[in-house]
Amino acid sequence: VLCRLACRNDWLLFAGNLFTLALECIAVPAALVLPFEARVAVGVTMLLMHVGIFIFQSALIGVFFLPNVASYILGFGADPNLANFGPAGPSAPWLLAVAVCVASATGVALRGGRLLPENWP
């Protein structure tokens, strides 16, 4: 229903495209030099973009973007010494990122290893 709504409204498609380009081409590269709180905001916004893909484009595509969540946790919200394990072992964000990757890989394995075709709608 929401996908059909978006397709019938050029302004909604334009806004979504503009938002995606600004986010991926301006905000994400800027995150390299932003303070921690701003990096977290960019990471949350990227996650929300994927929720939008799940809702407006395809649930299957949204699920296959799941591994990106691990990258966002590590890249936008992590302390630079994240992989520097101390006596207590890996940090909680690192373990969460690994869990997301394992969950995604399990989903692909349960589908028989089939990924999305190159010509998916």
Image: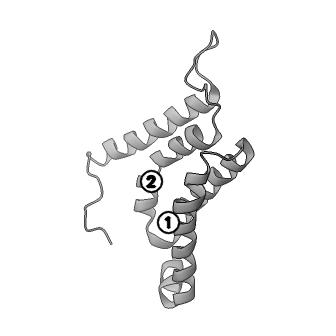
Amino acid type, residue under disc 1 in the picture: Ile
Residue at (38, 40) in percent of width and height: 105
Mark number displayed over residue 65: 2
Quick one: 18 or 111, which is closer to the camera?
18
Q: Considering only vertical position in the picture, is 51 above or below 18?
A: above
Q: Are marks 2 and 1 in contact (CB under 8 Å)?
A: yes
Can you give x and y, in whole percent of width and height, for residue 21 in the image?
52, 68
Can you give x and y, in whole percent of width and height, for residue 63 in the image?
45, 55
Answer with left or right where residue 88 lies relative to residue 7: right
Residue at (55, 53) in percent of width and height: 29
C-alpha gap between disc 2 and disc 1: 9 Å
Q: Considering only vertical position in the picture, is 2 above or below 11?
A: above
Residue at (41, 61) in percent of width and height: 61
Amino acid type, residue under disc 2 in the picture: Phe
Quick one: 105 or 26, which is closer to the camera?
26
Residue at (66, 47) in percent of width and height: 39
Quadrant assignment, res 15: bottom right
Q: Badge 2, how many Cα within 10 Å: few under 14, some, many 20+?
A: some
Indicate the quadrant containing the C terminus: top left, top right, bottom left or bottom right. Answer: bottom left
Circle 1 sits on which residue? 53
Quick one: 28 or 15, which is closer to the camera?
28
